[in-house]
Amino acid sequence: MNKQELLRNLPQIDVVLDHSLLSEYPDEYKDILLKSARQVVDELRNKILNGSIATKDDIDINSIVLTIKEKIEQQEEYELKRIINCTGVILHTNLGRARLSERALENVKNVSCGYSNLEYDLKSGQRGSRHDHIEKLLKELVGVEAAIAVNNNAAATMLCLSALAEGKKSMVSRGELVEIGGSFRIPDILKRSGSILCEVGTTNKTKPQDYIDGIDEDAGILLKVHTSNYRIVGFTTETSVSELSEISLEYNIPLVHDLGSGLIDSLTDNGIDEISVKESLKDGSDVVLFSGDKMLGGPQCGIIAGKKKYIDMMKKHPLARVFRVDKMTLAALEGTLHDYLYSTTTHENNPTLRMITYTEDELQKRATDLKTYIEKNTGIYTANVIPCEGQIGGGSAPLVSLSGFGVTLESSSFSAQKIERMLRKQSIPVIVRIADDKVLIDVRTVHDDEFEIITAALKNIEKEV
Ligand SMILES: *Cc1c(COP(=O)(O)O)cnc(C)c1O
């Protein structure tokens, strides 16, 4: 058939729009339907003109209508979307770090869909401070005099150094001049804050005397940085918070501890060798800094807590306004802190702590449940339960691997790589690892109510066989 004849076979736009599958859309879809219909028919016209369509059979009203429906669905999809994390890495920076608790989410919704007392004192009817809401809770939770939340821990570090050590020396061990995540380097932040880097000791050994030797009239702060994402092992000496605290008291120089992970209570019973916020404060830190979305298990933010004298200097600093957090973050943080303070089941409610503290038995049972569910509802996969290792991630506890269980999937229809790719392309993408040429789903980072989504995705892929 020649091109002219083929072009005459293209349906009129009105005819396409009158199709029963499109007439079910409500009125507000009128414009997008018209636009999509024109696009789809134009694409067909171009294909006829460039010769990639040569028969009448390729011009089918039903497939045109289905393509239009698909187009509309794609346009309605968000760019930033929910995904299912089957990697076993709990605080995956690429995947949004901590999941929020129910209480945190509920508070975000309540506070954000209406007006709030963000900066309004309900007692006096006067202007209030946005810092007060969470300060009260942090005072109670970790026993500090004052606290403030900013955009993230990088901002917390910047604000703290600017307010306490601008033009003065920040004394840091050479073994703690770390880079954390892309582009957060302690020496760079220090320089930007206007503080002067005073390197102390050596890469593997830093002793209390090394700090004392560096102290002069320009000394601003003693800065201890938790080497969150790496460990120096072997012939090493690290000056502890308690030892630094003694120097801090003797020479009257504030001790700042950048903790990163924000673990509130020690988890040594679970084999996690991260220093907690409470330990650091108990050992004598004047100010601690930590992330909201690492092991605290809350929203992205940076928390600065400690002596009122120092926190007040930070609250008054111009950068506090630059780094301030919005009501949604404060609401999520408040909800997260309520879980710690007013719940006897914090480890159940806080998804991060829950995922860290699963027992192997629990994980084995859950993996078995997932395997059974997949086998019952799909047809082309061989599923097996195997032991596997998860991680805390997010640059926390780099040496800890969390023993758990997962489900492997194999199929004679598709390679593991193909399954991985197709799972990633679903409307709710499912992100898996590949191990030993098999798809691996670590159930540690998957919630029970997500088993259904994973299974639906696997079923969807079967259509492509
Ligand atoms: C993660 C981390 C940071 C950066 O925190 P963000 O919240 O990602 O900005 C800073 N310091 C330490 C020690 C960290 O572990």
Image: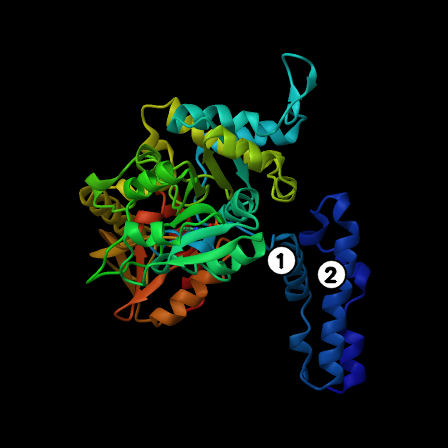
Q: Amino acid at mark 2?
A: Ser
Q: Is residue 307 left or right of residue 26?
A: left
Within-10-Å neighbours for mark 1: few <14, some 14–19, many 20+: few
Q: Which of the two residues, 254 or 400, is positioned nearer the viewer here?
A: 254
- Residue 41 on image: x %, y %: 75, 69
Q: Count of labels shown?
A: 2
* Residue bearing the label numbered 1: 74
Residue 447, located in which quarter of the rendered image? Answer: top left
Q: Is residue 111 left or right of residue 99?
A: right
Quadrant of the drawing holding the C terminus:
bottom left
Nearer the N terminus, badge 2 or badge 1?
A: 2
**Ligand 1 neighbours mark 1 (CB distance < 8 Å):** no
Q: Residue at x 25, y 53 (%)?
A: 400
Observer able to see residue 463: no
**Element marked by disc 1:** helix
Task: Tell me the distance, in whole angstroms, between the alpha carbons under discs 2 and 1.
Answer: 11 Å
State the mark number for residue 36: 2
Q: Which of the two residues, 178 or 41, is positioned nearer the viewer here?
A: 178
**Element marked by disc 2:** helix
Within-10-Å neighbours for mark 2: few <14, some 14–19, many 20+: some
Quadrant of the drawing holding the N terminus:
bottom right
Q: Which of the two residues, 444 or 116, is positioned nearer the viewer here?
A: 116
Q: Which of the two residues, 410 or 132, is positioned nearer the viewer here?
A: 132
Q: Residue at x 45, y 65 (%)?
A: 422
Q: Nearer the viewer, mark 2 or mark 1?
A: 1
Q: Is residue 432 left or right of residue 46?
A: left
- Residue 58 on image: x %, y %: 65, 76
Q: Residue at x 39, y 24 (%)?
A: 341
Q: Where is 211 relative to 36, above or below?
A: above
Residue 206, located in which quarter of the rendered image? Answer: bottom left
